[in-house]
Image: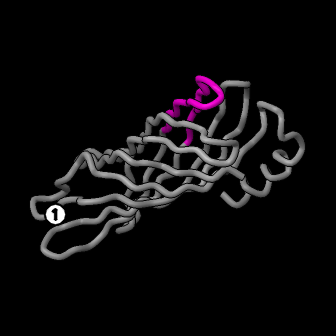
Amino acid sequence: MAVIAISTATVQAQDKMSPKKTVISIAVNAGIPTTTNITAKESISFVMGGDIQADFGVAKSLKITLSGGLENYSVKGDKLSSRSIIPLLGGVKFLFSDKFYGHAQLGYGIGQVGGSGAFAYAPSIGYNFSPKFDASVKYLAFSTSTLNVGSVNLRLAYDF
């Protein structure tokens, strides 16, 4: 992610008005789980996380995205604990207008314990409040052959 940030900072500085510019954003998100029971004795109560995302403009209304972050799942069970997943996602962002967009992402989630992984997907819809701030509602899910974990998140981002 650091290499992407450094290389795109140069591209972004070249032409701020171009629809093909590259934008880096940093975001926080919070959500509620759609999958509550992960084992017979454990359930997810809340999701909190953050990410860094790069949007590479390829046309006026189309961007290719790469993102990485950390999602922390608060787990209730015999004792209160948490589980973390690192989502690494690539996607496509469609600009419906200057303000509204749809975003579809696919990728891989790396688990906190043992580095186990899962297929990840995240469709979302968002709104650009200004050239620097946007918000989206994102469904983020991780799927393995034995477990599916999902959440609906509100993502608040600041664009550089």
Residue 91 falls in which quadrant of the image?
top right
The residue lying toward the viewer, choosing from 51 and 153, is 153
In the rendered image, which residue does mark 1 sit on? 42
Q: Secondary structure at mark 1?
A: loop
Q: Position of residue 131 (x, y in %)?
A: 70, 42
Taking the magenta stretch, the answer to whether it contains residue 36 is no
In terms of secondary structure, what is the magenta stretch mainly? strand
Amino acid, disc 1: Glu
Q: Position of residue 100 (x, y in %)?
A: 56, 30
Residue 15 falls in which quadrant of the image?
top right
**119 lies left or right of 65:** left
- 107 over 116 or under it: above or below: above
- 28 over 112 or under it: above or below: above
- 94 over 154 or under it: above or below: above
Q: Residue furthest left?
A: 40
Q: Residue at x 85, y 51 (%)?
A: 10
Q: Residue furthest front?
A: 129
Q: Position of residue 32 (x, y in %)?
A: 30, 51
For the N terminus, give its image quadrant: bottom right
**81 lies left or right of 129:** left
The residue lying toward the viewer, choosing from 115 and 8, is 8
What are the residue bounds of the magenta stretch? 90-105
The residue lying toward the viewer, choosing from 147 and 44, is 44
